[in-house]
Amino acid sequence: MDTQVQIGIDAISSGGVLGGGLALGDYKYLLPVQFTDFIFAILGEELGFVGMAFLLILYYLMARSLIHAAIKGINRPAGKLIVVGYAYLVLIQVIINVGVVLGVFPPTGIPLPFISYGGSSMLAYLGGFGLVISAVTHDE
């Protein structure tokens, strides 16, 4: 197993159920890419299982509401494709990032949507969200 993945798993396991507290984790100093690829491990250490589960539930609810809006609220096929495609894009990136942190997938460099540090990925997520809002509000 890769050293980064092992440190990430150790960070999550040290968080326990409730975590050690925000900005109180020690493993963030050991991970070389802690704010991008392995931010979920740092969140697991600092917020614990409850914080990780809460974040994953928020991602699920966001994707579910986007897909529901596409199915029920948008009449144009192009708008439906934009909204559903964006929802699945975010979900797939969450699954891959969490899988990398847990050692299921090899480290790939895919950031955690809306959480990881990085200007270009955040700009792309927000641009996609702008397309979603436009598709929902300008449906005819």
Image (cartoon, rainbow, N blue to C red):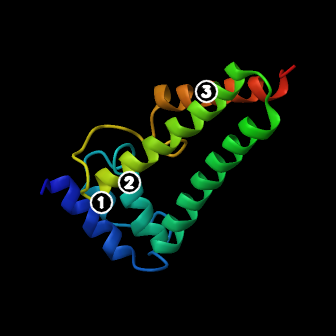
Q: Is residue 25 above or below residue 29?
A: below
Give the CA separation, mark 2 to mark 1: 6 Å
Front residue of this view, candidates 36 and 61: 61
Q: Secondary structure at mark 2?
A: helix
Q: Earlier in the sequence, mark 3 or mark 1?
A: 1
Q: Residue furthest bottom?
A: 17
Which residue was labeled with disc 3?
Answer: 128
Q: Is residue 30 above or below residue 126?
A: below
Numbered circle sitting on residue 93: none
Q: Secondary structure at mark 1?
A: loop
- Residue 122 lies, in percent from the top left, at 53, 32
Front residue of this view, candidates 24 and 105: 105
Q: Residues within 10 Å of mark 1 (few under 14, many from 20)?
A: some
Numbered circle sitting on residue 98: 2
The residue at the point 31 percent across, 55 percent down is 101
The residue at the point 41 percent across, 56 percent down is 40
Residues at marks 2 and 1 touching, judged by CB atoms closer than 8 Å: yes
- Residue 63 lies, in percent from the top left, at 62, 46
One can see residue 49 in this view: yes
Residues at marks 3 and 1 touching, judged by CB atoms closer than 8 Å: no
Give the CA separation, mark 3 to mark 1: 27 Å
Which residue was labeled with disc 1?
Answer: 102
Q: Is residue 14 above or below residue 99?
A: below
For the residue marked with disc 3, what is the amino acid? Gly
Q: Earlier in the sequence, mark 3 or mark 2?
A: 2
Q: Residues within 10 Å of mark 2 (few under 14, many from 20)?
A: many
Give the CA separation, mark 3 to mark 2: 21 Å
- Residue 77 lies, in percent from the top left, at 70, 22
Q: Is residue 36 left or right of residue 56?
A: left
Q: Residue furthest right?
A: 140
